[in-house]
Image: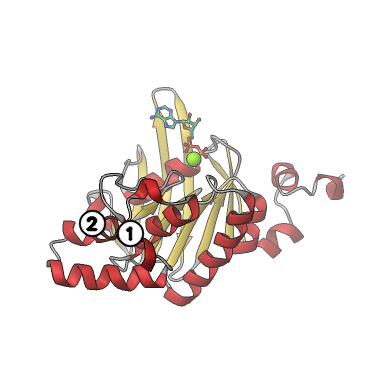
Amino acid sequence: MNAALLSLKNISMEYSNFIAVDDLNLDIKKGEFISLMGPSGCGKSTTLRMMAGLDNPTSGALYLDGESQLEVPTEKRGMPMVWQNFALFPFLNVQKNIEFPLKMQGVPSEARSKKAAEWIERMGLTEFAKRNISQLSGGQRQRVALARALVTEPRILLLDEPLSALDSHLRIKMQTELVRLHKELGITFIYVTHSQSEAFTMSDRVVIMNQGKVQQIGTPKQIYRAPNNAFVAEFIGMNNLIS
Ligand code: ADP
Ligand code: MG
């Protein structure tokens, strides 16, 4: 089997007297769609932020392709993040938003617009390319956010509850789009959600967390067949089965 693409070893994040992430170990494979799932406050976003380099753990190690990342700044890690609130630039139009990361990388203007145009087409945004972000629907904004994250062709995409701001109909549509995009691109998706159905329908593997600790890591099938403990059983709605 392949060695891990991204490896978290004994990662902890401690705030003054509170442990947000407690001794987390996780190996993520190349091309995998993996979800971090658990109730609000269990440490999902903190874990994702440490992967992205937005926060550094108080202890532990993080390896990308076997190389330690803790000294590597966010922009050099090449793991863009898609946020729940999309975090688009309101003063730039769709095309300029998508070009922005390329501009930061120093890609010349012509190459930038060519690359952005590819993603605008791929995400079905052609007719909105010159629009301002405020003139877009939630689903359209989410597509812009995805395009902006993917335009640099990262190996890993981090997604923090990216669909929570959408209504339920759109959420299900976007779930299908994300799964398709993941298949087509073959890159690693690391997906944070508090929604069991979202995690279980989309992911190859799911990491279930509670109070900063990993409760179980496995395929949806493995977790359903053999929940590790009462918390997992209850969280995935199988408490009746256990009792
Ligand atoms: P999740 O994304 O699973 O909802 P988070 O990772 O955002 O949870 O937060 C985990 C815990 O860490 C929460 O209890 C939160 O209040 C706490 N936390 C997050 N950031 C800080 C901070 N900067 N200072 C103190 N506590 C924090
Ligand atoms: Mg969160």
Query: Image quadrant of residue 234?
Result: top right
| SS at badge 1 | helix
Q: Is residue 94 left or right of residue 172?
A: left
* Residue that sits furthest to the top in the current view: 17
Residue nearest the viewer, comparing 84 with 70: 84
Q: Is residue 209 left or right of residue 43?
A: right
Residue at horizontal 37 percent and vertical 53 percent from the top: 81
Q: Quadrant of the C terminus?
A: top right
Q: Amino acid at mark 2?
A: Phe
Pointer 2 local density, CA inside 10 Å: few below 14, some 14–19, many at least 20 = many
For residue 100, the mark is 2
Where is residue 53 shown, x and y percent of the image? 30, 47
Label 2 beta carbon less than 8 Å to ligand 2 = no
Q: Earlier in the sequence, mark 1 or mark 2?
A: 2
Pointer 1 local density, CA inside 10 Å: few below 14, some 14–19, many at least 20 = many
Kindly indicate whether the residue at mark 2 contacts the one at mark 1 (C-beta within 8 angstroms): yes
Residue at horizontal 17 percent and vertical 59 percent from the top: 103
Q: Amino acid at mark 1?
A: Arg
Where is residue 241 shown, x and y percent of the image? 85, 50
For residue 103, the mark is none
Which residue lies under the disc numbered 1? 148
| SS at badge 2 | helix
Q: Is residue 235 left or right of residue 205?
A: right
**Residue 145: in sight, yes or no?**
yes
Disc 1 to disc 2, C-alpha distance: 7 Å
Where is residue 24 shown, x and y percent of the image? 48, 46
**Residue 203: in sight, yes or no?**
no
